[in-house]
């Protein structure tokens, strides 16, 4: 809706143009004693409405009315008999059929509006369509909210699964390293005791054998643990991948990067463990 200030300014300009027109073109507005054009005030009086109401209707339903404007300011409306009939029809739709401004606009844009006839059936159709549109909008909004919530819940669930899996893997690695250190310390203690009873050559051979055996066992354990963790991630990914939408699948790329990084680190660790070591390093079990 336009404001009261706008209506007052428009009324002032239109009235001023009417005064100028009355002073110079009175004869051009009358044919055979009947006015050719009517002013806003005259139309308002004929329809029993205020001037501001007529202006409001003219602005709101301009596409349907197409009232001609003249005068020095180009804002003075000239109403023909056809224009008045259209305004009467708009008044009928608003006040007798109790349609809203939006519903009237929708109806006036239809072919039935050209007949300007009572619209009992058309009114029902408009109301039904408006109700259907409102229900469809609410359903669409509800579905969108539920989808967003479902996606967020699934993403949170997957994130929690990955976090828990990472914790389990970290705990297993911690226990494995602890066990490995204990075994290595025990091996060194046994080695020191054995050193007093055997020669350096025997010690070197025994150390090399035990080191190779430990390295082989370590490699097997690391590979088994890594494969187990990778398999768990793959099963988790497979279980949820079937239920995710295209939007969710893009987020699973992060899992692939994690798995690839784990594989890469395992391979680097394997390569590091399989590097040949020096004589003293073999004896004391130090990494280069």
Image: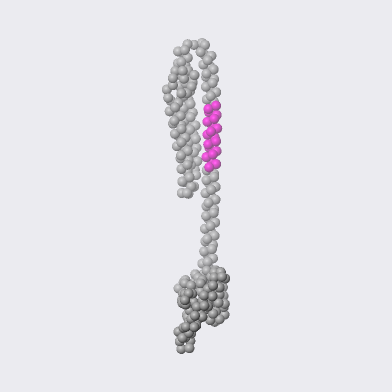
Q: Main secondary structure of the magenta part?
A: helix
Magenta stretch encompasses residue 242 = no
| Figure quadrant of the N terminus | bottom right
Asked if residue 89 shows in the view, the reply is no
Queried whether the magenta region covers residue 172, the answer comes back as yes
Q: Looking at the picture, how far across and down is residue 52, in whole percent?
A: 56, 75
Q: Residue at x 48, y 18 (%)?
A: 283
Residue at figure coordinates x 46%, y 27% from the top left: 219
Provide residue 253's location: percent of width, then percent of height: 46, 43
Depth check: give the residue in front, 4 or 103.
Answer: 4
The tally of labels here is 0
Picture residue at 52% right of the left edge, 78% below the top:
16
Q: Position of residue 115 (x, y in %)?
A: 47, 77
> Residue 274: image x %, image y %?
43, 25
The residue under the point 49% across, 34% down is 228
Rendered view: 134 above or below 189: below
Q: Residue furthest bottom?
A: 32
- Front one among 48 and 198: 48
Q: Which residues are magenta?
A: 159-178
| Image: 9 above or below 197 | below
Task: Give the colour scheme shown.
Answer: one colour
Residue 169 visible in the picture? yes
**Residue 70 to residue 237: above or below:** below
């Amino acid at each position: 809706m336009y404001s009261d200030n706008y209506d007052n300014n428009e009324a002032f300009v239109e009235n001023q143009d009417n005064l100028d027109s009355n002073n110079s073109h009175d004869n051009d507005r009358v044919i055979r004693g009947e006015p050719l054009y009517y002013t806003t005030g005259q139309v308002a009086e004929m329809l029993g409405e205020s001037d501001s109401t007529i202006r409001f209707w003219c602005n709101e339903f301009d596409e349907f009315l197409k009232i001609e404007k003249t005068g020095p300011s180009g804002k003075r409306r000239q109403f023909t008999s056809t224009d008045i009939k259209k305004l009467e029809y708009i008044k009928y739709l608003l006040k007798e059929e109790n349609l809203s401004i939006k519903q009237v606009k929708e109806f006036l844009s239809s072919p039935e509006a050209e007949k300007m006839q009572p619209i009992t059936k058309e009114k029902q159709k408009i109301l039904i369509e408006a109700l259907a549109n409102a229900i469809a909008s609410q359903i669409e909004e509800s579905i969108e909210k539920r989808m967003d919530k479902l996606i967020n819940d699934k993403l949170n669930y997957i994130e929690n699964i990955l976090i828990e899996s990472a914790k389990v893997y970290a705990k297993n690695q911690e226990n494995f390293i602890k066990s490995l250190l204990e075994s290595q310390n025990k091996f060194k203690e046994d080695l020191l005791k054995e050193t007093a009873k055997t020669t350096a050559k025997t010690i070197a051979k025994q150390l090399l054998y035990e080191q190779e055996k430990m390295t082989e066992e370590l490699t097997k354990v690391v590979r088994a643990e890594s494969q187990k963790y990778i398999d768990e991630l793959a099963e988790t990914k497979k279980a949820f991948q079937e239920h995710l939408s295209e939007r969710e699948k893009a987020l699973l790329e992060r899992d692939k990067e994690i798995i690839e990084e784990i594989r890469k680190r395992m391979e680097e660790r394997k390569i590091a463990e399989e590097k040949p070591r020096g004589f003293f390093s073999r004896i004391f079990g130090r990494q280069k």
